[in-house]
Amino acid sequence: MNLIVLFGGSSYEHEISIVSAVTLKDKIKKHNLTFVFVDRDRDFYLIEKENMKSKYFSTFEYKKAKKLNLVKNGFEAKKLFGSEKISGVVLNLIHGRDGEDGKIAGMMQFFCIKCITPNLEASVVSYNKLYTKMYAKELGVKVVDYKYITDDSYTPDKFPVIIKPVRLGSSIGVTIAKNIDEYKYGLDVAFEFDNGVLIEEFIEGVNEYNLAGCYANEFIFSKVEKVKKDKFLSYEDKYLDFSRKEAKTEEVSSELEEKLKDNFRKIYNTTFEGSLIRCDFFEINGEVYLNEINPIPGSMANYLFSDFDEVIEKLANSLKYEKKIDIDYSYINKIQMAKGK
C-alpha cells in the first residue's frame, strides 16, 4: 500500500505537524510512504524521504521540491512532457486549522481520494471544544462544567480555572489562573488566538488517561496511557512529547479500562468512521469524563499501539468512497416535456 502522509498546513500547529511527520517516517515500515507537505501558503510539495528533517522546512529548502496539484484520485506533478500522477491512501497529519477543521477532509472527499481522517462532520465536532462538549453530553458522556465566553464580561466565582481558546490544540493559548489578575492575563492570551474561549474549573491532581483507537470492521484500541505530570502540559512539553518512542503506561483496573473504552465507543460512534482518534479522559471519584477529542493525534499516537502498521492497514482497507448519487436529469426532462420542448 502507498500511504501519502499529508502534513504542514496554514496553522499555529504547523511545526507540530512537521515533527509528527518526521517521527512517523521511522514508525511505518510495512508500507511505502510518500510525503506531501502543505506550506504556509497552502502549496503542495512532494518531499523525498531523505529530506524528512525539520531543518529542511525551517530553512525553506523544501521550495526546491516538486510542486503538486490536487486532482481527481490523487496528486499530480507537472513534467516537461505531460504529468506524473501520485495516488494512494492519504493519511491526514495536519494538526489544527486546515487538517482538523474539515478543509482537507472535504477536499479529499470532493476529489475522490481515500483518506484516513475525520470527515467534515467529525472535524466540526472535534475542532471546536464547545461543540465537543455539547456532542459528548448528547451521547451521555460526562464533561467537566464549563463556561463559554466571547468577551471579558464574565468573572469566575472561584479559582483556579483553566482558560482555553475554543479552536486550538497542543495547549496553545491555554493558561491556568489562580486569581483575578492571572485570569485577566489568561483571557488576553486566549483572545489573541481565538474569538471564543472556554473557562473550566482546574481540578488539582485529577487522574488523566489517553486512549486511541479506530473502527475497522471492529473497534481497535490502543493501550491505555495514564498521563504522568506534575503540572499542566504546555505547548513545549507536548511538542517534545510527540517524538517519544513508547507510551507511559501503567496498570489500570479492568473496570476503569472498560469504562474508558465504553466512553470511547460512544464518542467515536459512526461520526468518526475512517479516522484514528485519541480521546483524553479524566477520572474523578471513579467516574469518567471526556476532556478532549484529538482527531489527529501527534504522530497518530503510534506509540500507544503494539503493531501500528497493522492498525493503519486495517483502517485503510475499511475506507469507502462517498456514495455516488445517480443524476439522470429526469426532473428537468419532465419540465421540458411539459413545456413541449
Image (cartoon, helix red, strand yellow):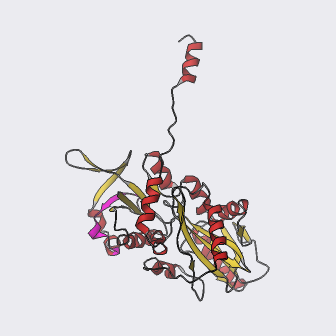
Quadrant assignment for the N terminus: bottom left
Image-based side of 133 in relation to 112, left or right: right
The residue sitting at 49% across, 60% down in the picture is 99
Of 234 and 225, nearer the camera is 225
Question: Could you say where residue 19 lies in the image, as x and y percent from the top left?
Answer: 41, 73
The residue sitting at 60% across, 60% down in the picture is 268
Question: Could you say where residue 239 lies in the image, as x and y percent from the top left?
Answer: 47, 78
Q: Quadrant of residue 8?
A: bottom left
Image-based side of 102 in relation to 313, left or right: right
Q: Is residue 1 visible?
A: yes
Q: Which residues are magenta?
A: 41-54
Give the answer, above or below, for where 242 lies relative to 74: below
Image-based side of 190 in relation to 50, left or right: right
Toward the top, the furthest residue is: 340
Image-based side of 307 in relation to 51, left or right: right
Question: Could you say where residue 200 lies in the image, as x and y percent from the top left?
Answer: 70, 75
Of 10 and 265, nearer the camera is 265
